[in-house]
Amino acid sequence: MALNINDTKFLEIAEIICEEGLSGIDKAVQIIINQAMLIERDRHLKAERYERTPERVSYANGFKPKQLKTRIGKLQLSVPQTRDGKFYPSFLEQGLRSERALKISLAEMYIQGVSTRKVNAILSELCGFEVTSSEVSRAIKELDEQLESWRKRELGHYVYLILDARYEKVRVGGCVQDAAILIAYGINLEGKREVLGVSVAMSEAEVHWRAFFQSMIERKFHGIKMITSDAHKGLKAAIRAVFPSVPWQRCQFHLQQNAQAYVPRVSLKKEVASDIRHIFNAPNDSEANRLLKSTISKYEKSAPKLSEWLEVSIPEGLQVFQMPKHHQIKLRTTNLAERVNREIKRRTQVVSIFPSEASCERLITAILVETADEWLGTDRIYLKMNE
């Protein structure tokens, strides 16, 4: 079936443009979309209106009205229905993502304390319609329900777990505090990245990390072979308590940074960094341990505190050598999380101070949902699992 608008509809569109000019564009587009949906329904049914054909899969079943807010104004659409209930216009499915983006934008403006009057001014300028305070509240409520559903969704089998935390300023009981944003990422059986969950807590204490892990297990999270994270005491304790048999890899990037605190002289910093880098870049576990022993001995007299720190801390960054060779480069640090953190920071620095924990959790979850959709929506494989 060729895409075609009949002469009557074409003349109707032409008359609107002639009489109303560009101000009538919304009405013209409305007619075109309604016609396009009818054509798409015919394609779904494999038959045109009143056509008798053995290929027909169902029958038309009237229309359902739908108001669509767009940047050219409000469109009053008549969405075609089918008896089997399996048809829905593809452009409306695609529009759901834009609708969610608009709701997230409303939520962000709400978080930042933008008044309904200012929101209306922006939407009137960009989209040609206004919103009321009740519509903003409904958008926030609906968004919260969607984000909560995402945070509680069922997980499954994952091979690797990457953990990270960042801090945002939140107003609690009239005081501004630093709230910890706990985030978990996973590599699934197909080698793709996923954002597994997020939690806003008042600190990185063991109790908060442990509760976060337990919530993931309740969502059927299982199967991991290794965990990568930094060495925060609360996080390490929670990992030992909840995942006692899972090997832990301390982020090598953070180890490099931590080492500098034990270097006694500025002139020694580059040399120490180079020695540690050689350990991490060793071809295998035995060579890494040989280089480690040599480095410990090298600084035993000139920098005894550094030597002691190397002996205790560096082995925590060598667990990755037990994983497949082609996985090691991406599992030895929490760089995966750092890239997401940069996007979170870009979006949250506008807010500066969140008015509540809920508002903080709302915006960061929305950002993570966008990231998760982007990762799962691509064919890109983060780690090749079958080599």
Image: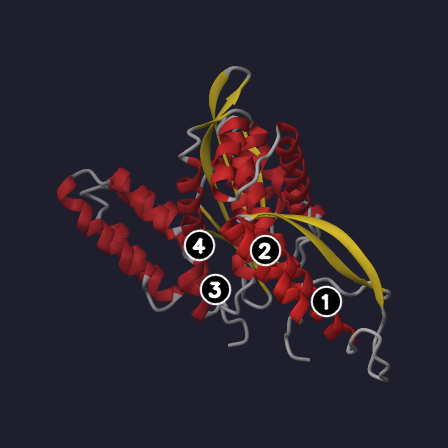
Seen from the viewer's position, the closer of residues 116 and 226 is: 116
Q: How would you rate the neighbour count of disc 2 (Cα within 10 Å): few for under 14, some for 14-19, many for 20 or more?
A: some
Q: How would you rate the neighbour count of disc 1 (Cα within 10 Å): few for under 14, some for 14-19, many for 20 or more?
A: many
Q: Residue at the spot x=39%, y=42% of the render? A: 346
Q: SS of the residue at dot 2? A: helix
Which residue was labeled with disc 3?
322
- The picture places residue 203, in percent across and down from the top left corner, at 51, 30
Q: Nearer the viewer, mark 2 or mark 4?
A: 2
- In this view, the residue farthest toward the top is 174
Q: Verify CB contact (< 8 Å) between mark 4 and mark 3.
A: no
Q: Residue at the spot x=59%, y=30% of the render? A: 358
Distance between the Cα atoms at labels 3 and 1?
59 Å
Q: SS of the residue at dot 4? A: helix
What amino acid type is highlighted by mark number 4?
Answer: Leu
Which residue was labeled with disc 4?
336
Q: SS of the residue at dot 3? A: helix
Q: Verify CB contact (< 8 Å) between mark 3 and mark 2.
A: no
Q: Which of marks 4 and 1 is in front?
A: 1
* Vertical side of 118 occupied by 129: above or below: below
Q: Nearer the viewer, mark 3 or mark 1?
A: 1
- In this view, the residue farthest toward the bottom is 54
Q: How would you rate the neighbour count of disc 3 (Cα within 10 Å): few for under 14, some for 14-19, many for 20 or more?
A: few
Q: Residue at the spot x=41%, y=51% of the render? A: 339
What amino acid type is highlighted by mark number 3?
Answer: Gln
The circle on residue 16 is 2
Whichever of callouts 4 and 3 sits on the residue coming sooner in the sequence is 3
Seen from the viewer's position, the closer of residues 174 and 215 is: 174
Seen from the viewer's position, the closer of residues 232 and 380 is: 380
Seen from the viewer's position, the closer of residues 378 and 224 is: 378
- The picture places residue 172, in percent across and down from the top left corner, at 54, 20
Which residue was labeled with disc 1?
38
